[in-house]
Amino acid sequence: MGDLLFKIEPAVLSNEPDVTFNKLNPNKDYLLVIASDGVWDYLKYDYSATQMNNNLLEFLGLSMSAWCQKKKAAEGGKVDKKNNLSEISPEILEDIAKVIVQRDYVKEVYCQGLDKFDDCTAFLVFIPAVNAGSKSNNL
């Protein structure tokens, strides 16, 4: 029943990986977003793909900044308006990933909530810039 796509000849699904290599600038921070189709398929589609990506990136940036400020305030630290991504922790990334997969809270990014169920999985990987004093600048 559920594995029908695996039994059809010719095969509908391929086990051949689709791999892309990108050279990263060692002086920049990066955020890698790995998510299932349940996340990507419900992004607002009334924009171009570039605009959809920009909307999601803006949401992620604002979320990371807000979480960092909240964490600082909870720890009694000075809250400033500067975005310091070096303070991104695994907990912050996990919290933001949870918000992404619970689409009801991200109306500015998604065209609908969880009215229709699809698997929603998201991983956020923060790749910090390499220190200027570091010997290696290969990422």
Image (cartoon, grey):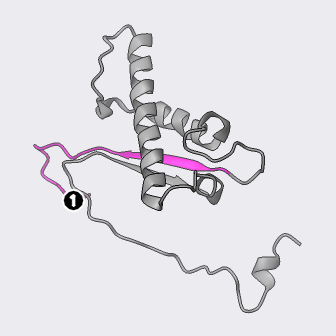
State whether residue 61 appears in this view: yes
* Residue 102 appears anywhere in the view: no
Q: Secondary structure at mark 1?
A: loop
Q: Which residue is mark 1?
A: 138
Q: Residue 58 is drawn in which quadrant?
A: top left
- Report the front residue among 16 and 104: 104
Tell me the magenta residue range: 120-139
How many marks on residues? Answer: 1
Tell me which corner region of the image, top left, top right, bottom left or bottom right, holds residue 100. Answer: top right
Quarter of the image for the C terminus: give it. Answer: bottom left
Vertical order, 40 against 95 (above or below): below
Instruction: Determine the residue positioned at 48% across, 46% down.
Output: 56
Residue at 66% x, 55% y is 38
Give coordinates of residue 125: x percent, y percent.
43, 47
Q: Residue furthest top?
A: 76
The kind of residue on which mark 1 rests is: Asn
Name the residue located 46 percent from the left edge and 46 percent from the top edge: 55
Q: Measuring from the top left, give residue 111's x and y in whole percent.
A: 64, 47
* Nearer to me, 6 or 102: 102
User: Residue 101: x percent and y percent?
Assistant: 63, 43
Question: Looking at the image, which is closer to me, 30 or 55?
Answer: 55
Residue extending farthest right: 1
In the rendered view, does 64 fall on the left or right side of 15? left
Q: Is residue 96 left or right of residue 119?
A: left
